[in-house]
Amino acid sequence: MITKDISLEDCILDLIDNSIDAARVASRGDISNLNDYFIELNINPESFSISDNCGGISLHNAIDYAFYFGRRKDAPKDVNFSIGLYGIGMKRAIFKLGRKIEISSYTNEHKFIVPIDVDQWLISDKWDFELDPLENDKPKGTYINVKSLRDDVSKEFTDPVFINSLFEIIGRDYASFLSRGLNIKINDKLVNGYNYAVMENSDFAPSLISYTDDGVNVEIRAGIAALPDDESDKPQKYQDVKNYGWFVLCNDRVVLAADKSIKTIWGRDSFPVWHPQYNGFIGMINFRSEDSSLLPWDTTKRNINLSSSVYKRSIQRMAELTRPWIDFSRKKKDAGYTPPISQNSYSSLVEKIDTNKTYKAALLIPDISKTPNLISIQFRKSDKDVNNVKLALGNARMSNREVGEKVFDYYKMNEVD
């Protein structure tokens, strides 16, 4: 039952969450620099392993809490700013993965291993886990090795699409920790954190609202990563488009990614539903609290608790920061062209806010109302002829709109001017 409400990706993320919490403890709460910590995953059709050097599980916690099903009434408070929510990640993850499990821990005081044969354990009338001392030495951390993988898990691990997707999810959801130096590897290959970069120049600037609500610090940022395309025949790359929208974080960990649904603001009340003309917008709202139970996430940590009062009160603020971009993109679409903008520079949404810089309370965008009187000219020609013109113009990859503009400019220059 404990494995039914969690996906395979969620299992792996749960284990990473536990390692990051351990690093927070080992660094005494200061995770501004995580260069000394690593998390390594090895994934293949026969086995799964995850190891870290983040301090390990204390003998006391192992005996009294880590392998206890449910949450004991006398359980200590979670790590401040924890992301290993409710302490249930490890157990449901390892049972979801396979049947032969070994969990080893190395701390300053103790070294031990917990071997689990799930099939034997299930038929036993004694549901305790055996804990054995270790003699060898390894870096202080936790080492989990799972064999006899479940058939569906083994099948997923043979699929390169799954592995590539895992790289992408980890790079996206843990971008804040990776930007502080945390090293995460999958099969000896380093995971690169996604760079949530937005424009910052005289025309565009990121916005920021921060406040405290019922024990939760809320920080909302919004910005423009790119201008949307001017025409439908030149679509933006899917890689870019799928990273637009609203991102919801809890204690710096992405819970809801690139949302374009009513879960955030799109289509809620009188706010418009997401449309491709809004491509380029990125919003990021981060809920932080020492007490992770106050945060608006569910136990899978991949969705939002929509009934959370803290979250409900944040929605209006999110709409305020999005509305200027909605208005600008509509004016841009009506005008039919992209206004000239200053040379781009970029700032990161996941880095600490520069306290010496003044951030706008709402998105700064250029005024498109003072545009020249423009009209559209439309005509249809065979794709073969259009492609030949592109070649003659020296750029086979230019858009159809650009072809039309070049041809018009040529005729105007030679026949009118």
Image (tube, rainbow, N blue to C red):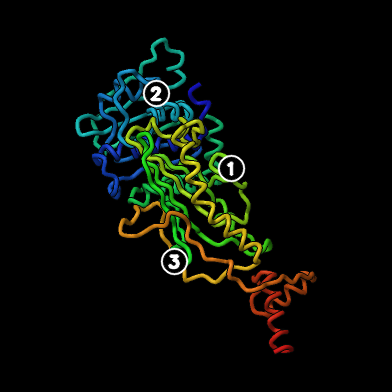
Q: Which mark is residue 116?
A: 2
- Left or right side of 288 for 411: right
Q: Secondary structure at mark 2?
A: strand
Rounded to the nearest angstrom, the CA distance separating label 1 from label 3 is 29 Å
Compare residues 362 and 125 and report the one nearer the observer.
362
Q: Is residue 224 above or below residue 248?
A: below
Compare residues 192 and 311 and report the one nearer the observer.
311
- The residue that label 3 is drawn on is 201
> Do labels 1 and 2 touch, CB within 8 Å?
no
- Left or right side of 46 for 52: left
- Left or right side of 207 for 77: left
Marks 3, 2: nearer the viewer: 3
Q: Indicate the quadrant containing the C terminus: top left, top right, bottom left or bottom right.
A: bottom right
The residue carrying pointer 3 sits among few (fewer than 14), some (14 to 19) or many (20 or more) residues within 10 Å by Cα, namely some
Looking at the picture, how far across and down is residue 149, in whole percent? 49, 31
Mark earlier in primary sequence (3, 2):
2
Mark earlier in primary sequence (1, 3):
3
Mark earlier in primary sequence (1, 2):
2
Looking at the picture, how far across and down is residue 195, in whole percent? 44, 55
Rounded to the nearest angstrom, the CA distance separating label 3 from label 2 is 57 Å
The residue carrying pointer 1 sits among few (fewer than 14), some (14 to 19) or many (20 or more) residues within 10 Å by Cα, namely some
Decide if residue 339 is in sight here. yes
Q: Secondary structure at mark 1?
A: loop
Marks 1, 2: nearer the viewer: 1
Q: Amino acid at mark 3?
A: Asn
Q: Amino acid at mark 1?
A: Ser
Q: Residue at x 45, y 16 (%)?
A: 122
- The residue that label 1 is drawn on is 261
Decide if residue 47 is in sight here. no
The residue carrying pointer 2 sits among few (fewer than 14), some (14 to 19) or many (20 or more) residues within 10 Å by Cα, namely many
Q: Residue at x 71, y 71 (%)?
A: 375
Q: Residue at x 41, y 30 (%)?
A: 89
